[in-house]
């Protein structure tokens, strides 16, 4: 899911990108992104898939700022 954000030319801060593991296999990209919007502006959400198309239980969340990513780690880690 790519959410409205800066232009494609804008530089993305890779330090504001999180790897999220142990996701429910039933979660959609939209649900995944929506869960993290409480921590800040989500620019991108991506769920990894196995070659057979099934979800791997891992995803990436790109926040706009490092502070938002840090808040997500602090408040959502191991919960």
Image: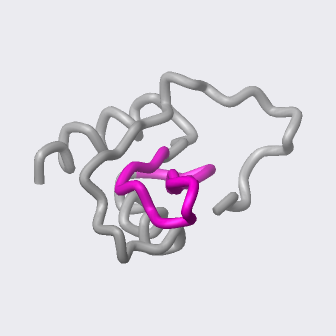
Name the residue located 39 percent from the left edge and 49 percent from the top edge. Answer: 58
Name above or below for residue 54 compared with residue 78. below
Q: Decide if residue 39 is on the left or right side of residue 9.
A: left
The percent coordinates of residue 62 (x first, y second) are 54, 42
Q: Position of residue 15 (x, y in %)?
A: 49, 23
Assign the magenta stretch its main secondary structure: strand
Instruction: Say left or right for 33 vs 39.
Output: right
Q: Which residues are magenta?
A: 40-60
Q: Is residue 66 left or right of residue 6?
A: left
Q: Residue furthest front?
A: 52
Q: Quadrant of residue 2?
A: bottom right
Image coords of residue 75 (percent x, y): 18, 47
Q: Position of residue 61 (x, y in %)?
A: 49, 46
- Residue 12: name its quadrant: top right
Residue at the extreme left of the image, as rendered: 79
Count of marks, rendered view = 0
The C terminus - image quarter: bottom left
Magenta region includes residue 13: no
Name the image quarter holding the N terminus: bottom right
Residue 58 on the magenta segment: yes
Q: Nearer the viewer, residue 12 or 18?
A: 18
Pick whichever, 35 or 28, lies toward us: 28
Asked if 14 appears above or below 21 in the picture, the reply is above
Residue depicted at x 44% and y 49%: 59
Here the colouring is one colour
* Residue at 88 percent of width and 33 percent of height: 9
């Amino acid at each position: 899911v790519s959410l409205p954000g800066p232009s494609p030319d804008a530089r993305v801060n890779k330090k504001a990108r999180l790897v999220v593991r142990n996701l429910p296999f039933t979660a959609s990209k939209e649900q995944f992104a929506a869960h993290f919007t409480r921590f800040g502006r989500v620019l991108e959400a991506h769920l990894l898939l196995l070659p057979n198309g099934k979800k791997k239980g891992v995803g990436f969340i790109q926040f706009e700022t490092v502070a938002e990513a840090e808040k997500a780690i602090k408040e959502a880690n191991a919960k």
